[in-house]
Image (cartoon, rainbow, N blue to C red):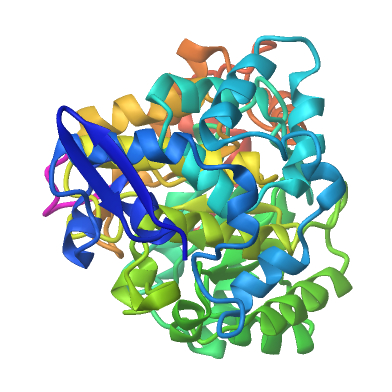
């Protein structure tokens, strides 16, 4: 086990392992303080970052953060590592890798260079370099990465910002869900997915919601995909019954133990991916997995320990979850950045930083990355914080964000983005919906040639077909 030392201001700091060094180099956040692995002072944090900058990338292939023998996520990371893709950066330190990334993004063809290197990067390498980067560095590099995915719409194209329309209802009431869906569609949302968090995970309730969303989609031929965010085993069972399953959802984490807490493993996720693809319901592609992550999930499951039994910082574990995701070539992945609570990300500043880190790490590892720009009501955050995070993520080229009626999810009890927030981001940043969805809205006269939503009187709306005649 490698030890690291760094002198700063007359004090010599010692870090007993790569696990401790990564944790102490992480920007301040409440989850690491809760786990007992955070730096004790700003000076120690800077010393750790300085020492980390001198660590060769090769070390992450031999000095493993979580043991290979006891963790299948680690085995996936090491066994799937591409030595040929890695060759381009194999001689670099973490600090040198940061400089290399910032140099690449200033040159033509940056997207192709970053895509070619991606299979050679491990989550630990990417997490490490993110700890040395300013927010603007995270934005600049993420913006240069291009990752697209396809089902009925194409996501991740430059100049596009897609949305998950989230019409949750506390009792899964069909009328409430339909009303929220109609509201979102009228405001140009839903091109990434129309996705419901069900109030219950029962197969019967999930099946009813799937049929409801499929009826809404097919009634006026909306080019999008639907998803009911039930446990993957529930969805597999419904696929076997030939129910209208478009995307297969599952929350994932960065350690085998945390995934066991979710009732999953890699083999089950691969089975789900195969089952979803077997239906072949996509029209422009067949990426079917919808995966969700969040900093602090492993800590909350008490499954955040690494080599030597010491706690691993939550951001490194979050990046490891992206190794699980990229194994499945998903349609969409998103981090629910402020959802788990202030125990893990205390305030708006920590949420902002985590959102940029997660987006950067996910895209650099080759994922179609989205972010749920959100916070819980007991966090030190408000809508000004979400405005800022939405804006900088739009600049950084985020694939999609989540939007709910009025920015208030009345079922899950947290604050996200509103449909109007998405209109703001598209307008000020010159972004447009997914191309297939935009063309559909144009055919119905809902947007102009620039992709801007047009005002339409309710009685004349082309979506009146979604409302039953007796309503």
Residue drawn where x is 67% and y is 64% of the image: 77
Residue 110 is at least partly visible in this image: yes
Instruction: Answer with the quarter of the image where residue 195 lies.
Output: bottom right
* Residue 265 in picture, x, y percent from top left: 61, 83
Residue 262: horizontal and vertical position, in percent?
A: 47, 81
Residue 376 colored in magenta in the image: yes
Camera-side residue: 333 or 417? 333
Which region shows up in magenta?
A: 374-382
* Lateral position of residue 269 relative to residue 51, left or right: right
Image vertical order of residue 103 relative to residue 315, above or below: above
Question: Is 321 a magenta residue?
Answer: no
**Near-viewer residue (383 or 198):** 383
Does residue 82 appear to the left or right of 446 in the view shown?
Answer: right
What is the quadrant of the C terminus in the image?
bottom left
Residue 103 location, quadrant: top right
Q: Please state which of residues 60 and 402 is positioned toward the viewer in this rendering.
A: 60
**Residue occupying image coordinates x 39% and y 76%:** 308
- The residue at 78%/63% (across/down) is 80
């Amino acid at each position: 086990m490698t030890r690291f030392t760094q002198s700063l201001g007359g004090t010599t700091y010692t870090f007993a392992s790569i696990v401790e060094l990564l944790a102490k180099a992480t920007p301040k956040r409440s989850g690491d303080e809760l786990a007992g692995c955070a730096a004790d002072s700003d000076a120690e944090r800077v010393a750790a970052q300085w020492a980390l900058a001198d660590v060769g990338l090769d070390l992450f292939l031999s000095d493993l953060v979580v043991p290979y023998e006891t963790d299948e996520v680690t085995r996936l990371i090491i066994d799937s590592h591409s030595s040929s893709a890695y060759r381009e950066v194999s001689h670099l330190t973490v600090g040198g890798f940061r400089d290399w990334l910032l140099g690449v993004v200033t040159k033509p063809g940056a997207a192709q260079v970053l895509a070619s290197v991606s299979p050679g990067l491990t989550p630990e390498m990417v997490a490490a370099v993110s700890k040395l980067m300013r927010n603007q560095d995270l934005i600049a590099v993420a913006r240069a990465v291009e990752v697209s995915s396809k089902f009925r719409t194409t996501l991740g194209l430059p100049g596009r910002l897609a949305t998950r329309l989230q019409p949750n209802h506390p009792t899964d009431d069909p009328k409430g869900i339909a009303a929220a869906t109609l509201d979102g569609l009228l405001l140009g949302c839903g091109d990434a997915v129309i996705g419901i968090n069900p109030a219950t995970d029962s197969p019967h309730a999930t099946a009813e919601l799937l049929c409801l969303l499929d009826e809404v989609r097919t009634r006026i031929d909306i080019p999008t995909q639907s998803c009911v965010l039930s446990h993957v085993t529930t969805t597999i069972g419904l696929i076997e019954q030939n129910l209208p399953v478009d995307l297969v959802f599952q929350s994932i984490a960065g350690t085998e133990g945390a995934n066991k807490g979710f009732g999953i493993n890699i083999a089950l996720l691969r089975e789900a991916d195969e089952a979803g693809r077997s239906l072949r319901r996509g029209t422009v592609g067949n990426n079917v997995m919808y995966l969700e992550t969040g900093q602090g999930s492993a800590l909350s499951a008490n499954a955040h320990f690494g080599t030597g039994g010491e706690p691993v910082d939550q951001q490194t574990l979050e990046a490891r979850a992206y190794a699980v995701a990229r194994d499945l070539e998903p349609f969409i992945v998103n981090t629910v950045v402020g959802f788990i609570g202030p125990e893990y990300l205390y305030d708006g500043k920590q949420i902002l930083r985590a959102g940029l880190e997660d987006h950067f790490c996910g895209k650099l590892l080759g994922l179609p990355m989205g972010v749920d720009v959100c916070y819980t009501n007991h966090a030190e955050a408000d809508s000004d914080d979400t405005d800022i995070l939405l804006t900088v993520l739009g600049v950084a080229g985020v694939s999609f964000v989540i939007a709910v009626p009025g920015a208030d999810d009345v079922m899950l009890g947290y604050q996200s983005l509103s449909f109007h927030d998405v209109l703001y981001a598209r307008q000020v940043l010159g972004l447009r919906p997914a191309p297939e969805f935009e063309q559909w809205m144009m055919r119905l006269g809902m947007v102009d040639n620039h992709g801007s939503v047009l005002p339409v009187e309710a009685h004349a709306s082309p979506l009146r077909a979604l409302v039953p005649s007796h309503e």
